[in-house]
Structure formats: structure tokens, C-alpha cells
Amino acid sequence: MLLERSGEERALAEALARVQGGAGALVVLEAAGGLGKTSLLRATHERAREDGLRRLHARASELEAGFGFGVVRQLFEPVLHQASPEERERWLAGAAGLAGAMFTAAQAPAAVGDDAVFQRLHGLYWLTANLCDDRPLVISVDDAQWSDEPSLQFLGFLARRIEATPVLLLVATRPIGEHSQPALTQLVADPTAEVLRPRPLSGASVGRLLTDALAADAEAAFVRACERATQGNPLLLSELLRELTALRIAPTAAEATRIEALGPQGVATVVLVRIARMPTAATALARALAVLGDGASLRAAAELADLDDAVPALRTLLAAEVVVESDGLSFVHPIVRAAVYDSVPDRSALHWRAARMLAAAGGADEAIGAQLLAAAPAGDPWAVEALRAA
């Protein structure tokens, strides 16, 4: 059983029941990474399997975001591949045949014009409807913030027609923001969507997990320190628990002060692996932000990263929940910034450049001085004067 997710589990069970009764449903799980969206999807799929429903699942990836209909292929190719010739013929009959080439050709042909796009979406809808002829269907897409635009268009097309179709459409995404893909924003805002937003764990649940994992009653001060360090995020908490177990740290008030400095190194590894898979521009922007510090402007970070157009890179970092927009750009957690900062191979040079850049832009003396202090001593007369001014 998932801790503090009974409300979400109940809503998903009710949506599943509606679909089994012949109605369609769209449920969106919108929450930060690590708050249990994937676990809720898995639990719903398992319940659907037990009830005999057909299940299609896809997980979007930043590596595949540029491949048109990549998520759609993940959804439909397995069931079509496993089907008998008779089943494939039946499922792709009629209007569904408009989408048939996507799954029979080595590569889906490029759409030309609005009519071609509509025909493909129309065909995919009827393929979905045909799959529901003998039993209800569950379609789930995890990490939808990474989905390709054509696949998101299909999900929206299906959502607008779902009420009369026995389909449960489950979409898990990180929080929608200004730079989210328009098709995803529209999907979450669909009037038929039931949007569930799992929240961070309470202190009581954090304490329960600590006590279970460390086989000792967690003292209140220790629980509070762990809650602050992880912000109640189950993923961050699980990584912290691994580290506490490995270091044999007892959950006592005396050990609470070690938590902030300790920081879950497993989370740092997760973040760095995620950033390493991103486009070069996103990595450069993340490193520039780590050097500039929280609250930096996109303009300053783009200049430091030598990016003419940093918006695509920023969208990548926002979608991955590496950074957030609030009074400038900031990392979602000090642990994340520390992990990125420690990975910068030329920190001293970047700090030096940042100081020069801030000075040229008329930045505050204190900000310029902070950058120079983080750079390797150079004995430069300008740097000496700047540090005196700070």
C-alpha cells in the first residue's frame, strides 16, 4: 500500500469502475518527480489486469521527444505485434486503416498538411475504439512532459471523444508551467479531466518510514531534519534512507544535525545521470545556473553558457524538474544544485567569466565579489579592486 495515497487510489479505482461500466474517463496525475505517479500507474494497471481489461502503456523519454508519434508507437505496436492476423485485420478495419501505415511501415510517413494530420489522428482514434470492442481498455502514458508533440495531439484528440468510449486514459506528468508543450497544457486543462496531485509525505509518514527502515523509533528532531532535507519527497527520502542505512546512522536527535550536511548522494547521482542524457545546451545552462546561484536570470545564464537561444534548454530543465521559475531561476533543491555544481569541470573559469559579465551589466558589487571569491586567485588588478568594493 502506498503511504498517503488513498485518495488517489480511490479516484483511480472509481475511474476504472466507470470504464468497466461502458463510459470513458481521463485522469491526469500531475506532481513533481518522486511523488508516486509511476507507482499509482502501476497499481492501476495491476488492478486492470486482475479485472481482465486490455492495457496499453508508454513511458516518454527526453531522448525520444523528437521522434514523431514515438509514444503512440510504444502504446500500439506491442498489442498489434502480438495479435493474430485476423485480430489485426479487424482492429485496423474501416477508418482505423488511416493509421495502419504507422505500424506496418519501417517508419511512419511524414504528415503533410492539416488534413493528413487529422486523418492519422482519426485513424488512431478508431483503432482505439476497435480495441474496445471486446473489452474495456486502459491507456497510460508516464512522464508525458517528455512526449513528442504528435502523440500529445492524439491523446488530446482521444480525450475530447472519450466519454462514449470504454477507455481509461491515464496521463502522468510533472507540473504544468509556462514552458510546457501546448498540447500537454490543453490535455490537463480538458474539462473532462480529473486531475490528481499527489502531495509530499507528512512528518508522520516520514517518521514511519524511518522507523521501519532503521529498525528503531525515530526521534522527533531526526524526523524533522529528514523531512526538511527531502521536502517529504518519497524518492529523495528513499535515497536518504539508503545512505542512512549504509552509514548505520541511528535516528536520534543527536544525529539530526548530520542530515543537512549528509545529503542523499543517491539523489545527486540520479540528477547527474538525468542531465547527462539531456542535449548539450541544457547541460551547459544547468552548469551556468549552478555557478550563478539561485535567482539568476535566463539572460545571464544564457550569456554565461554561450547560448544564443536558451529557451529550448530551459524547457528541458523545467520539464525534468531540475530548475523552477520563481523570482528568477532556481534549482528545485539545494541537493540538486550541489550535484550540478560539483560536476562542473571548469568552475573557476566560469566564476571568473561570471564576475566580468556581472560587472559589465552593472551588477551589485557583492555579487561580483562572490564570484571572484569562488574563482582561483589570479592577482588581476581589476579583481583586487572589485573585491575591495565588495
Image: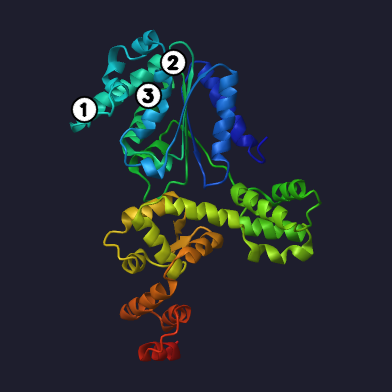
Q: Amino acid at mark 3?
A: Arg
Point out residue 187 in the picture as x, y percentages from the top left corner. Answer: 39, 36
Residue 132 — which label? 2
Cα distance, mark 3 to mark 1?
A: 19 Å
Residue at label 1?
Answer: 116
Could you tell me if the residues under marks 1 and 2 are in contact, i.e. CB atoms within 8 Å?
no
- Which of the two residues, 81 or 231, is positioned nearer the viewer here? 81
For the question of whether residue 68 can be seen, the reply is yes
Which of the two labelled residues, at mark 3 and mark 1, occupies the earlier sequence position? 1
Residue 161 — which label? 3
Cα distance, mark 3 to mark 2?
A: 14 Å
For the question of whether residue 328 can be seen, the reply is no
Task: Determine which quarter of the picture holds residue 255.
Answer: bottom right
Which of the two labelled residues, at mark 3 and mark 2, occupies the earlier sequence position? 2
Q: How many marks?
A: 3
Where, quadrant-wise, is the C terminus in this rendering? bottom left
Secondary element at image label 1 = helix
Point out residue 161 in the picture as x, y percentages from the top left corner. Answer: 37, 24
Cα distance, mark 1 to mark 2?
A: 25 Å
- Vertically, is 359 above or below 51? below
Point out residue 271 in the picture as x, y percentages from the top left corner. Answer: 50, 54
Which of the two labelled residues, at mark 1 and mark 2, occupies the earlier sequence position? 1
